[in-house]
């Protein structure tokens, strides 16, 4: 059981560090939490693997749950980010974007006033 726990600590820590290194699609806060927990899991796992030679050790049960929750949240954030990008691409640029300016002409220039169509002059 000890070897499985150490292996899971190291692998989940590395996975969280990889998720923290991906910049797009997640908030800075979530990336920071991934980095902190990933570093903690990896360091503690490496300590148990390399320097621990028997005795008592702390077994954190959230080590088995937290990485799964972080991975699920990571992929939800990524899919939401992609959906926002696709929606922005379908919507296109804002009206008037890239259009030449009116060069000082007042709005409605050349339009009839009063909103009623006028008879052409004959």
Image (tube, grey):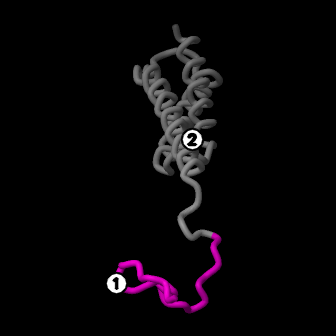
The residue where tag 2 is placed is 82
Secondary structure under the numbered disc 1 in the rendered image? helix
Identity of the residue furthest to the front in this view? 122
Q: Is residue 113 magenta?
A: yes
Disc 2: CA contacts within 10 A as few (<14), some (14-19) or many (>=20):
some
Identify the residue at image location x=60%, y=17%.
7
Query: Relative to residue 24, is residue 112 drawn left or right?
Result: left
Q: Nearer the viewer, residue 112 or 70?
A: 112
Q: Percent x, y for residue 82?
A: 57, 41
Q: Which mark is residue 9?
A: none
Q: Is residue 13 magenta?
A: no
Secondary structure under the numbered disc 2 in the rendered image? helix
Q: CA gap, disc 1 to disc 2?
A: 47 Å
Q: Nearer the viewer, residue 83 or 72?
A: 83
Q: Percent x, y for residue 51?
A: 62, 25
Identity of the residue furthest to the top in this view? 1
79, above or below 32, in the image:
above
The residue where tag 1 is placed is 114
Query: Relative to residue 77, is residue 113 drawn left or right?
Result: left
Residue 31 visible in image:
no
Identify the residue at image location x=65%, y=78%.
100
Tell me the magenta residue range. Answer: 98-122
Q: Percent x, y for residue 43?
A: 58, 33
Comes first in the chain, label 1 or label 2: 2
Q: Nearer the viewer, residue 37 or 107?
A: 107
Identity of the residue furthest to the bottom in this view? 104
Q: Nearer the viewer, residue 97 or 24?
A: 97
């Amino acid at each position: 059981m000890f070897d499985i726990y150490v292996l899971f600590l190291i692998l989940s820590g590395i996975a969280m560090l990889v998720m923290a290194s991906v910049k797009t699609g997640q908030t800075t806060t979530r990336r920071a939490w991934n980095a902190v927990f990933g570093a903690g899991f990896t360091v503690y796992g490496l300590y148990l693997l390399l320097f621990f030679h028997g005795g008592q050790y702390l077994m954190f049960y959230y080590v088995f749950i937290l990485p799964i929750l972080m991975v699920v949240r990571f992929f939800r954030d990524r899919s939401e980010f992609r959906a926002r990008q696709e929606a922005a691409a379908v919507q296109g640029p804002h009206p008037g974007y890239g259009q030449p300016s009116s060069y000082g002409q007042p709005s409605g220039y050349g339009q009839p006033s009063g909103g009623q169509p006028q008879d052409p002059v004959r």
